[in-house]
Amino acid sequence: MLTGERRIKLLEAIENKQFISVSQLSEIFQVHETTIRRDLDELESQGLVVRIHGGVVPASIKQDEPVFEDRATENILEKTRIGKYATKYIKSGEAIILDSGTTTLQIAKTLNEMPHLQDITIITNDVNIASVLRSNRSITTIVTGGTLFHDSFMLNGQIANESLHQLSVDKAFIATPALNVEKGLTHFNELLIATKKNMIDASAKQIVVTDHTKIGRRALYTFLPIDQIDLLITDNQTDKKLIDEMYKNGIKRIESI
């Protein structure tokens, strides 16, 4: 197989697998690993793939996320609208998980403007959300504990996961940096996956809140398949074709506002 042809097929294999190791590619194409590494160097120089520890992923897969301060000002009107709308699914007496995120933060801010809601329990792994709710006497706020991630003000790790294991709540409002129309909710950082999964496992209903810029993206790790999303709340700029594709792949309900 000629070098150019092998590199085309190499790229196809990486796109299909989403993540693949150098040794696997060497076995598939029956060439030495040093040859594969040269091929990958060339593909990476063209911006087609990204080398990560243990292998390679397509360049289209999101690798990182902006710090909180940058995310907090992006699409703020859409996030505020989504956050306010999402509170219609919160009722007095319920126990709710608010995942760490800039859109879930807007849910917390809106709850402070809704004195008719009483006896609500909010569980969160977000220091900002806990701070926003600190003076709300109608809400019992439980912080998971855990290791603080300084760029996002979220708490994760073993302590957070152990606290979530003990809970059973009515609903979880989940944030995501990427929603793939086939794979569902995906994340770039494997260290954050366990806490999100534990939030989902602890809840009877999973509600995803995210603006249109996250839909159609994908990151390396899936933490909630598309057909397990009970409700997606997004803004009205979301591409209609993407909405149709999500329904085809099994999402239960989408509300774009």
Image (cartoon, grey):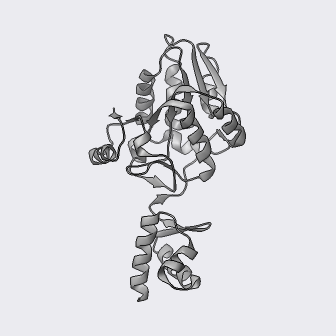
User: On the rendered structure, is 53 left or right of 184?
Assistant: right
Which picture quadrant has residue 139? top right
Q: Is 222 situated above or below 30? A: above
Q: Position of residue 143 (x, y in %)?
A: 67, 29
Image spot of residue 220 (x, y percent): 51, 56
Which is nearer the eye, 76 or 227?
227
Horizontal placement of 136 versus 43: left or right? right
Residue at 46% x, 65% y: name it: 17
Q: Quadrant of the N terminus?
A: bottom left
> Which residue: 43% across, 80% down?
7
In the rendered image, residue 52, in percent from the top left (x then y), is placed at 58, 66
Q: How many marks?
A: 0
Q: Is residue 55 above or below residue 169?
A: below
Residue 204 in picture, x, y percent from top left: 50, 29
Whether residue 186 appears in this view of the structure is yes
Residue 41 showing in the rendered view: no
Image height of 49 relative to 66, above or below: below
Which corner quadrant holds the C terminus?
Answer: top left
Q: Residue at x 54, y 36 (%)?
A: 200
Placement of 134 over or under 115, stated as above or below:
below
Q: Which image quadrant for residue 34? A: bottom right
Residue extending furthest bottom? 2
User: Which residue does the image show at 55% across and 36% down from the upper left?
Assistant: 201
Which of the two residues, 11 or 103, is positioned nearer the viewer here?
Answer: 11
